[in-house]
Amino acid sequence: MAEHDLGTDTPTTVNVPDKPALEGLEDIHSRRWREEGTYAFNPDTVREQVYSIDTPPPTASGSLHVGHMFSYTQTDVLARYQRMRGRNVFYPMGWDDNGLPTERRVQNYYGVRCDPSVPYDPDYRPPAKPAKNQRDFDVVSRRNFIELCEELASEDEKVFENLFTTLGLSVDWDLTYRTIDDASRAVSQRAFLANLTAGDAYLAEAPTLWDVTFRTAVAQAELEDREMPGAYYRYGFNTPGGDKVYIETTRPELLPACVALVAHPDDERYQPLFGTKVTSPLFGVEVEVKAHPLAKPDKGAGIAMVCTFGDLTDVTWWRELQLPTRAIVGRDGRIIAETPEWITSDEGKANYAELAGKTVFSAKEKVVELLGAAGELDGEPKTMMHPVNFYEKGDKPLEVVTSRQWYIRNGGRDEERRARLIGRGQEIDFHPSFMRSRYENWIEGLNGDWLISRQRFFGVPIPVWYPLDDAGEPDYEHPILPGDGMLPVDPAAEPAPGYDESQRDAPGGFIGDTDVLDTWATSSLTPQIVGRWSRDEDFFAKVFPFDLRPQGHDIIRTWLFSSVVRADALQEAAPWKHAAISGWILDPDRKKMSKSKGNVVVPTDVLEQFGSDAVRYWAASAKLGADTAYEVAQMKIGRRLAIKLLNASKFVLNLGATEASVITGDASVVTNPLDKSLLGQLADVVEQATAAFENYDYARALQITESFFWSFTDDYVELVKDRAYGGAGEAEQASVLAALATTLDALLRLFAPFLPFATEEVWTWWRAGSVHRAEWPGAQALAGIAAAADKDLLGTVGLALGGLRKAKSEAKVKQRTEVLSAVVTAPAALIAQLRAGEGDLKAAGNARALTFEESDGDLTVKSVELAPAEA
């Protein structure tokens, strides 16, 4: 059990405090670890020595919650174990400042709005007292806005760093990064340009999910379905023969955008109409009746009105049936003002004028009103609840608008790439393993490529410009790209290569792309960002592919998948070897904790109340992937364990255990069967805990270690006090002290990943260096003892001692009361164990005479005669 790095083989003086306590340990040891570089990564290394972690960068502009303590503790436990196994642990921390939460916080905090067309002001400072109304906010350039974001984020990050330091995360704080700093922006833009050059990124005008509140495109991974009230409206289209074909729709406001009616090919009701044209009510536009297998004969009237675009099914029909585009909803969520060219009748134009400029909600009311007035509605609307697409951060249903956007190929339109990405997932060991199916199911359900452009201000600018022809029209087919030395670059504020700023927006000049990359387009590159890809390839080779990606199961479809997409395209590899998937934190009613539900617990309060080791115990008791209830009771158990570790260690060291007593090779000093039994059990615990950690089952390792610890303190320590004080001679004392010191040494190492502060405190009492740089315990030194030991002996003797204690408790006398005589009945094998430990049993139970009788039943202590109570 030798140490490495900050450890030492030189015995130290035992210096145990009179009253050990948990209070204040976080400050003392966190400061010491930082000063001594206990968790520093050594870059002078080779890949085989490294264990690299792609740590999730939290959104520092968000609120602190117990979920941060939960999932980050689980990662830290694994990191600490690997470090004690001798690995050079690369454990960075990032801050995800790039995104909408930071943008909104900065706007309100400083009272500013971003306008990319505004020139940069190097001397700008926000108002001392921000305006309350957004219309009165200062308007600033994107570069000024980013600077304000960085300024505020740095303050927010200090709060997070303080939390994580208090929690005992063993990250290397010299390896921090931001997803919006210069290095991250350059890496993100460089990766995009590499994708573009390889044909993995492309620009296309296509139907796009659009959030009308934030005025930005939304990717499939950012969707969530919300149940909303709605109604089916039934009205008819006129056939050439004068009959009506009735449809039922929840979106009558899109009637002017109708491009076809679609029914299932096998639906006999509509087969005669396939290929014919019908005319829409109110607007008099002819559309063709088509057949398509996605139509559902049992839904509504069995024939659907296809509009451009009501939902993603409309997009599929539009694409596969090669239908025309007749968009009427603008990016502001309102019906476009100009009457479309396909509405040619006077009645149709007049009806459209009633809708122009209205929101889709008001337009729906007006169309229903017009249909009713024209006698076109068939019956009353049928109310119902149905799932509606929302942007996960949005408040209004998404629309589908046609726009020009950037995409990265992700297998959504490419079977070969889809199969390759599923194969990449199979190269990663998921913990728990069933989480792999969520990854594969997401890929198999993709219906399009990854939309990566966003119409926001704060983010990584898309690094392209477009040349303008003599008429001032942009040539999107031939974008102008920056040289690598220009990165990071903002095309909205910097001229294109070969041009000057005076040529911006001028015929024959250029226009800069004003969009930014999706947040995930940068976050998907965390291995490349922190691994220094494209900046220090030698360093990158030492950490990539990373050993571990820890994250929540809710972002498998976003962060995990998108990271695999980028690594596959850029490195032709999976980005990590293992993925550790955490569950959610649930409130006591088993509901997910969330800010919107108002059931979030502030972590600083919990840490102050119970201490970091107690909170870590709660988090580490939960297996990976398991949704876990917030349980104060579990934290109380953890606090009790940490306190017991301090007090039990004090007791063991005061019995005379020292570093010199720890068995490192020759174990001949251990002669007593009870001591051998303890060390045999210890060898099993070390072996089982190590196997559990190797399987990423840290919760099992904690359970095994804790169970042994309580047996050690409640049974063994109580049994051997007399021998430890020399009551049975020097040889017996040496045997017990070796067992005590060896077990305490191993327990501190076994508990170190879970209870870093309590274990470090005890370590300083009798050892040099840090327990967190000590070697993980091995069973080799105990192999000889373990092979010959009766591992059940300690449990049997402990059970008999418990019987004597129980008799004294029932008699309501003190435990030090002498037992004049007692009878212990048990099977023959247990009697043999009791005789081997009889000396310790008598001493611990203060028993003058014990009689052992064989029986077929369980071990029983009876006929206990106690000395008369003292007067």
Image (tube, rainbow, N blue to C red):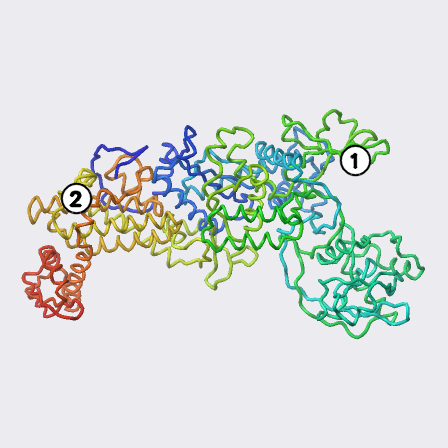
Q: Which residue is drawn at 80% across and 36% down?
A: 474
Residue at left 81%, top 73%? 378
Quarter where residue 628 is shown: bottom left
Quarter of the image where the C terminus is located = bottom left
Locate residue 350 relative to residue 778 in the image: left or right.
right
Q: Which of the numbered marks, if any, corresponds to residue 178?
A: none
Q: Quadrant of residue 524?
A: top right
Location of mark 2 (residue): 738
Q: Is there any visible trace of residue 871 in the rendered image?
A: no
Secondary structure at badge 2 equals helix
Q: Distance between the residues labelled 2 and 1?
A: 81 Å
61 relative to 794, above or below: above
**Residue 683 percent location from the top left of the image:** 24, 48
Of residue 172 and residue 548, the one placed in the foreground of this image is 548
**Residue 475 image label:** 1
In depth, the one of 292 and 313 nearer the eye is 292
For the residue marked with disc 1, what is the amino acid? Asp
Question: Looking at numbered disc 2 in the image, what kind of residue is underneath it?
Answer: Ala
Q: Is residue 101 left or right of residue 864?
A: right
Residue 158 percent location from the top left of the image: 49, 39
Q: Where is residue 530 in the image (x, y as percent from the top left)?
A: 51, 35
In this view of the protein, can residue 524 be seen by the observer? yes
Q: Which of marks 2 and 1 is in front?
A: 1
